[in-house]
């Protein structure tokens, strides 16, 4: 099981690498790693387990964050409509997105960043994602709202981008931030 000591923190070069595509069909090892990442998220959202193992509750985790420079990430969170989004994506790609932008009104954080960083992080309001799933199917799905933000945050990790790279210094006109 993944615990916080397995999560790489900022400063480690793997967080600035461009992760490599996963060979398809994914190997049992790649699938096991993605499953473990997904399990971290569900464990971290279980009060008892999170307390027992001192896990920081998380909604998304990308493979580079556990030192694996491969293009896969896991998501497990409910959205504004209390709809559960629980995925393991392999070789995800944002194939289109809205011009409209949005941001979390309290800014973002990161499991790999042990400090608060102020500032709005501009994200596409809506995205279309192509990916292979943990179940081996190829999907093309549209996301909006909080989930779209989580996915863009995780996609950035696959390209060596940290959320604070996107915080604009000037108070540029962001579209209304998402009321989360
Ligand atoms: C950085 C941290 C504050 C730990 C953030 N927490 C989080 O999203 N908690 C959360 C949210 C829910 F909706 C339901 C729930 F059960 C727990 C997080 O996991 N991430 C993921 C991350 O660092 N991925 O690399 C950061 C968020 C910032 C914007 C989207 C994800
Ligand atoms: Zn992160």
Image (cartoon, rainbow, N blue to C red):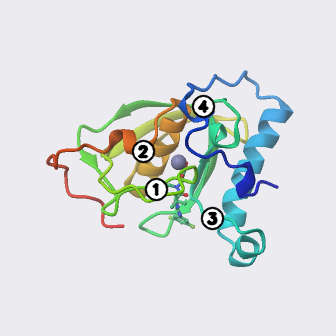
* Residue at mark 3 to residue at mark 1: CA–CA distance: 12 Å
* Residue at mark 2 to residue at mark 1: CA–CA distance: 7 Å
* Mark 3 or mark 2: whose residue is earlier in sequence: 3
Q: Position of residue 80 (x, y in %)?
A: 41, 66
Q: On the rendered structure, is 99 left or right of 117?
A: left
Dot 1: few (<14), some (14–19), or many (≥20) neighbours within 10 Å? some
Q: Position of residue 171 (x, y in %)?
A: 16, 50
Dot 3: few (<14), some (14–19), or many (≥20) neighbours within 10 Å? some
Q: Position of residue 110 (x, y in %)?
A: 51, 52
Name the residue rendered at 66%, 30% in the picture. 69
Most extreme residue toward the bottom is 48
Circles 2, 1 touching at the beta carbon (< 8 Å): yes
Disc 1 residue: CB within 8 Å of ligand 1: yes
In the image, which is nearer the foreground, mark 4 or mark 1?
A: 4
Residue at mark 1: 109
Residue 85 seen in the figure: no
* Residue at mark 4 to residue at mark 3: CA–CA distance: 22 Å
* Mark 4 or mark 1: whose residue is earlier in sequence: 4
* Mark 3 or mark 1: whose residue is earlier in sequence: 3
Name the residue rendered at 57%, 49% in the picture. 112
Disc 3 residue: CB within 8 Å of ligand 1: yes
Q: On the rendered structure, is 71 left or right of 144?
A: right
* Residue at mark 3 to residue at mark 2: CA–CA distance: 18 Å
In the rendered image of this protein, does residue 33 appear above or below residue 55? above
Residue at mark 4: 13
Residue at mark 2: 163
Q: What SS does tag 3 mark?
A: loop
Disc 2 residue: CB within 8 Å of ligand 1: yes
Name the residue rendered at 77%, 41% in the picture. 33
* Mark 4 or mark 2: whose residue is earlier in sequence: 4
Q: What SS does tag 1 mark?
A: loop
């Amino acid at each position: 099981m993944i615990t916080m000591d397995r999560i790489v923190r900022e400063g480690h070069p793997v967080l600035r690498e461009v992760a490599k595509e996963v060979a398809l069909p994914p190997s049992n090892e790649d699938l096991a790693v993605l499953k473990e990442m997904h399990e971290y998220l569900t464990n971290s959202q279980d009060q008892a387990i999170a307390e027992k193992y001192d896990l920081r509750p998380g909604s998304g985790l990308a493979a580079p964050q556990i030192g694996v420079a491969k293009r896969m990430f896991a998501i497990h969170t409910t959205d504004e409509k209390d709809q559960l989004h629980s995925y393991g994506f392999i070789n995800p790609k944002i194939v289109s997105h809205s011009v409209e932008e949005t941001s979390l009104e309290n800014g973002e954080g990161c499991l790999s960043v042990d400090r608060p960083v102020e500032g709005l992080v501009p994200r596409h309001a809506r995205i279309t994602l192509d990916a292979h799933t943990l179940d081996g199917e190829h999907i093309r799905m549209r996301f909006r709202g909080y989930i779209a933000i989580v996915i863009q945050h995780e996609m950035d990790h696959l390209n060596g981008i940290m959320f604070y790279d996107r915080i604009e210094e000037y108070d540029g006109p962001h579209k209304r931030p998402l009321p989360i």
